[in-house]
Amino acid sequence: MNLYPRHLQPKLEEALSDTPVLCVLGPRQVGKSTLCQQLAAERHYLTFDDHTILTAAQQDPTGFIQSLPEYVTLDEIQRVPELLLAIKAEVDRNRKPGRFLLTGSANLLLLPKVKESLAGRIEILNLMPLTELEKAQCLPSFLAQLFSQTLKSSITASQQELTGIAERVCQGGYPEPNTRTPGRARQWFKQYLHTIIQNDVKDIASIRDEDELYRLAELLALRTGSLLNINSIATDLKMRRETADKYLSILEHLYLVYRLPAWHSNQSKRLIKAPKLHMVDSGLAAAFNNLKAEDWHNFSTNFGPLLETFVIQQIRAQADWLEEPVRLSHYRDKDQVEVDLVIEHGRDVYGIEVKKAASIQAKDGEGLQRLAHQAGKHFKGGVLLYCGNNAIPLKTEHCLAAPIEWLWRNDF
């Protein structure tokens, strides 16, 4: 298997140089353990997937931590959350940088009582599935140019459709299925979801019915890129609303789904406040939608939401590499005018729309125009990412339609 360079690595190395505890969180099988072992090979490494080590840590958390070497990597920390208090006590005694490198496949910040034990003593970074930029081994450029307003229109050839987009969407970013044929990759995705529900859920919650949770995950994959409606989900699955809400939170804890909140301005009262729901990985969503790359031009299939999920997946990961945090959301008003992704960088607002087509129509970019009006002076620009080859100016100032491949190229 190819070991792709991960663009989060410089932030990890920097954090280890000045922070006592670093925790790398993200979905299972995205390469957290591999990355941590590469950048800290001299550390003692323990995984709580090992039952003997897990039992020892559970039986005596304080004694376990006190018995460890000074520099240690602890893999799958969510399996023993009681260790966090013992780590806190040890770090308060000795705050030497880089002492503990933790990884987790559940979002610890969403788990009860964890925030208190982590506060002020730990840095948390997220490692998401591989981006197309990392696969291409290119340095990030898109967000930097968006924020510096240096993205320029460029018509260099006759209008054509980009090739290979469907294959990228269906592959997704998990390293293992990227080494397989498409059919074998789909089998991996379905087995992956089964394994997580059977093995990992019990680490963070108790549920009465694993089959119900699996059916919810399947349904959410079918609804990726849509507004979240818990009542509709509960009705379709014939379960109580409270159960559907709890199970959704579990899937979110395990980095399988992602809620993209609604953007709104204080002045506007016409905006829809419901979040949008996205699967964390487009390949996982494609497998459960039974969509293949060859279905791209089949108009009876709906690749649009899947492409939107793919773009959000790329930009979320790129945002994690930045020095300064950004806020991500979506825009939708009661006229059903939408912007798929709103990026707030400080007080500046940017919009990203996604379009499967290879051509641009006069009405395209209406969402960016509406967002620009709502954000006022804070709106700094927007991009409509589409499947054509030219970068074309839109009628809204500082906005253009650009090839979707700009997300993984740095030579535009």
Image (cartoon, rainbow, N blue to C red):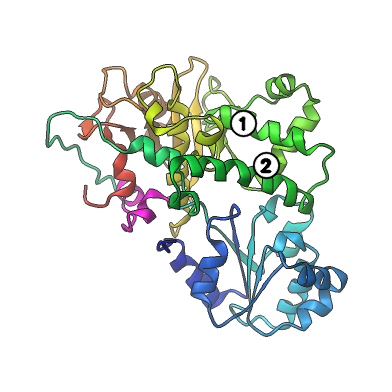
* Residue 273 percent location from the top left of the image: 59, 27
Image vertical order of residue 284 relative to residue 76, above or below? above
| Residue 185 counted in the magenta span | no
- The span picked out in magenta is 131-147
Image vertical order of residue 329 relative to residue 78, above or below? above
Please rate how many residues cluster around mark 2, counting C-alpha atoms within 10 Å: few if below 14, some from 14 to 19, many from 20: many
Q: Which residue is mark 1?
A: 220
* Residue 75 percent location from the top left of the image: 65, 67
| Residue 139 counted in the magenta span | yes
Q: Amino acid at mark 1?
A: Leu
Q: Amino acid at mark 2?
A: Leu
* Residue 394 percent location from the top left of the image: 25, 27
Which of these two is toward me, 85 or 30? 30
Which of these two is toward me, 50 or 226? 50
214 sits left or right of 399 in the view: right
- Residue 398 seen in the figure: no
- Residue 119 seen in the figure: yes
168 sits left or right of 29 in the view: left
Q: Earlier in the sequence, mark 2 or mark 1?
A: 1
Say which mark, if any, is on residue 251: 2
Q: Residue at x 59, y 77 (%)?
A: 98
**Element class at badge 1:** helix
* Residue 303 percent location from the top left of the image: 43, 27
